[in-house]
Amino acid sequence: MSAPERPLVAVLDYGIGNLRSAQKGLEKVGADARLTADAGLIADAAGLVLPGVGAFGRCMEALRAAGLEDVAAGGVADAADGGRPFLGVCVGMQMLFEGSDETPGVPGLAALPGRARLLPAEVKHPQMQWNTLDWRRRPGPTTALPDPAWVYFVHSYGVDCPNDLVTATCDYGGPVTAMVDRGRCWATQFHPEKSSATGLALLAGFVAECAAPATVA
């Protein structure tokens, strides 16, 4: 009996941050994960991942310089309509929205409504710690995660967005958006690849979605 095929997952390579950590996490849970900016490979992939570490403005500028802005925005739109799965991570989640107060003059992808804003003044910046998720719902990739789910955060900005997008929050000077979803687009403010077994369970759920058929009507 042959081994099941590993779904091809394109990790968008725009040359900034530790993109390989996301690639390695996906490989560990069964994906054929490729760090790439190649249009043909991206077109053939069963799922797309947009990681991000560092400053919002630098990440957006690098994404545009790599010619991946439209790829990422189109990937979110397709996933939101039930097509090919898309996962954003940390700054990669913030970039899906309209912009960030960290770099006011640099627009985001505006694929989802909302904006990244500085965490409350009374808490330490950045939030650099393990924290628990407060679930609002449990979409596909999250169903195998424990409750409470401990995950690892490193960020000073959090997304302010419509309530119907919010999958989970964490408590850090008040509720902070920790995960969002729309259709087959999911994005996390925390780092699944740094969140031990819980994070790997989320990545495994995403890879399973990549292996499943699209739900576009």
Image: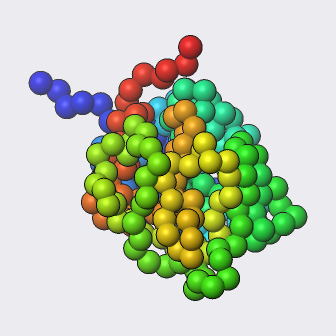
- Give the residue at x 66% y 33%: 77
Up-down relation of residue 20 to residue 97 (above or below): below
* Residue sitting at x 60%, y 33%: 80
- Nearest the viewer among 150 and 66 is 150
Of residue 22 and residue 118, the one placed in the foreground of this image is 118
Which residue occupies 42% across, 61% down? 133
> Picture coordinates of residue 185 (x, y %)?
55, 39
**Number of labelled discs?**
0
106 up-or-down from 39: above or below: below
Residue 68 falls left or right of residue 148 = right
Viewer-side residue, 6 vs 170: 170
For this orientation, the residue located farthest to the top is 217
Q: Which of 128 and 109 is in front in this view?
A: 128
Extreme-left residue of the structure: 1
**Where residue 120 sits in the image (x, y, percent)?**
65, 77
Residue 150 lies, with reference to residue 51, above or below; the image says below
Q: Where in the figure is residue 183, as x and y percent of width and height?
A: 55, 33
Q: Quadrant of the C terminus?
A: top right
Q: Is residue 62 visible?
A: no
| The N terminus - image quarter | top left
User: Which percent across, then down, holds residue 35?
Assistant: 51, 51
**Is residue 191 among what the camera can see?**
yes
Q: In which quarter of the image is residue 78?
A: top right
